[in-house]
Image (tube, rainbow, N blue to C red):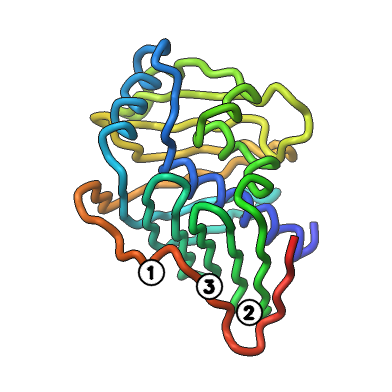
Amino acid sequence: MNPAEMKLRFRLASLALACGLSAAFVPATQAGAIDDFQRYVAGRGALTGQFTQESATGSKLRRTSGTFAIARPGKFRWAIDKPFEQLIVSDGAKVWFWDKDLNQVTVRQLKDALSATPVALLLGGELLAQFNLKEGGERDGLQWLEATPKGKDLQFQRIAVGLKDGVPMRMELVDAFNQTSRIQFAQVNNAAQPAANSFTFSPPAGADVLQQ
């Protein structure tokens, strides 16, 4: 797998994880972890924190870290700081992907960006029809919910969310290549309201802007 493909896979995983925290609709008929998550997102409109992601590529393990800010509905800022800089920003209608090394910006409609990722599940609404949901039980001191896509055109086979006291603390993604990405959240704050400009983006001077 070449570096461009690796970055694309990581970018899709990051988008899924970022949007997952902004979930607004989970079926109330589910119990346990799913019910806890539904109550949590129904009661909080914003979330900030830090993340560490480990993604396996063959025998290699890639580790990245950064910060995030979430505001419903559909607004988020997912900033990767190490070992390279990438930024994903959504204003609720469009999503901007900025790769600092390439100084390249890719712009997509939010609904189109979601159509190829399991984030569709976590944003709810009609998109939930693409997935089968089930309780994942208890593991590592967390309550888990799991989902598998019904179709065959998504980038991931399975997504799992681990909650503690109803708050997302870990996420796991298994992609189409059977590779697993794990995210650990830290310093999660559901009381502070992110600044409004957290969810706006202007391409840097000289950036190559691609509209998709």
Front residue of this view, candidates 51 and 88: 88
Amino acid at circle 2: Asp
Query: At which x and y percent is residue 114?
Result: 63, 43
Above/below status of 190 relative to 159:
below
> Which of the two discs, 2 and 1, labels the residue nearer the N terminus?
2
Residue on which disc 3 sits: 85
At label 3, counting other C-alpha atoms closer than 10 Å, the crowd grade (few under 14, some 14-19, many 20 or more) is some
Separation of disc 2 and disc 3 at Cα? 7 Å
What residue is disc 1 on? 197
The numbered mark, 2 or 3, whose residue comes first in the sequence reads: 3
- Are dots 3 and 1 in contact, CB under 8 Å? no
For the N terminus, the quadrant is bottom right
Q: Position of residue 151 (x, y in %)?
A: 74, 26
Residue with the most extreme front position: 93
Q: Which residue is mark 2?
A: 101
Answer few, some or many: residues within 10 Å of disc 1's Cα (few below 14, many 20 plus, some between 14 and 19). few
User: Residue 134 — which label?
Assistant: none
- The residue at 62%/56% (across/down) is 11
Q: Are marks 2 and 1 in contact (CB under 8 Å)?
A: no
Residue 129, given in percent of the width and then of the height, sits at 62, 22
Label 3: which secondary element? loop
Q: Earlier in the sequence, mark 3 or mark 1?
A: 3
Q: How far from the left and from the top, in percent, is residue 54?
A: 52, 51
Q: As shown in the figure, which amino acid type bears the numbered disc 1?
A: Asn
Q: What's the residue type where badge 3 is placed?
A: Glu
